[in-house]
Amino acid sequence: MSRLAPLRRIFVGSPVVAALVYALSILALVWLGASAIIDLAAKREQLSDLSAQLAQFSGRKRTGAAVGGVAAPGGSVFVEGRTVTIAGAALVQRLTEAVAKAGGNVVSTQVDLPAPRATTNLISVVANCELEQPALQQLLYDLEAGLPFLFVDQLHVQQSVAEAASGTGRLRVLVTVSGQWQGQM
């Protein structure tokens, strides 16, 4: 005789116990199904909230760009270029465009490229430029807020004594800007 014989007698012999086990099984399946549906509904609500938040952020970005008249920056976070020399030239071009956009002019530039066996691919440009005092803040914001990610390492500002007394004149700005080059792909 098997060990399960007493249990079999209880379940087979008693319809009440069998019905109770059947009802408990059905309740467990309904509970599992309901909890899965509730979980899916919660995840769908969370997705809906995140989508609304994304739309709100996108709307702010578009609204801010439309108000300021400036398009949102696009491109890579790295200074782009197939070689380090091309990437350095791209960084000089980006800096020159930012100075021109601020109403200034670049007097001279110097590119500091990483050594051939350097562990970091940090490219720096030292630029000597002239611009009006109110345009300096615009220049710094444009450099640090746009793409690629650029960092102002050093900033030296000079104004002649005569121009400072009159409150007019252009500033002589020596700025060092650096950016990360992704390297050869």
Image: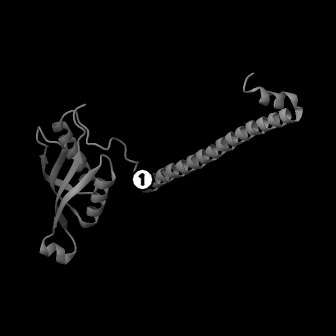
Point out the residue furthest to the front here: 1
x, y percentage for residue 179?
23, 47
User: At label 1, which amino acid type do we have?
Assistant: Gly
Residue placed at 13% from the left, 75% from the top?
162
Is 79 left or right of 38, judged from the image as shown? left
Quadrant position of residue 7: top right
Q: Residue furthest top?
A: 1
Its colouring scheme is one colour
Residue at position x 15%, y 69% in the image: 159
Q: How many marks?
A: 1
Front position in the image: 32 or 173: 32
Residue 164 visible in rendering = yes
Image coordinates for residue 95, horizontal then vertical, percent = 23, 50
Residue 135 lies, in percent from the top left, at 27, 62
Q: Quadrant of the C terminus?
A: top left
Q: In the picture shown, does residue 59 fall above or below 117? A: below
Q: Residues within 10 Å of mark 1 (few under 14, many from 20)?
A: few
The N terminus, quarter of image:
top right
- Front position in the image: 49 or 112: 49
> Looking at the image, is 18 positioned above or below residue 106?
above
Which quadrant of the structure image shows residue 80? top left
Q: Nearer the viewer, residue 69 or 53?
A: 53
- The residue tagged 1 is 69
Q: Is residue 96 among what the camera can see?
A: no
Identify which residue is drawn at 61% across, 46% down: 48
- For residue 82, which quarter of the picture? top left
Secondary element under disc 1, as helix, strand or loop, is loop
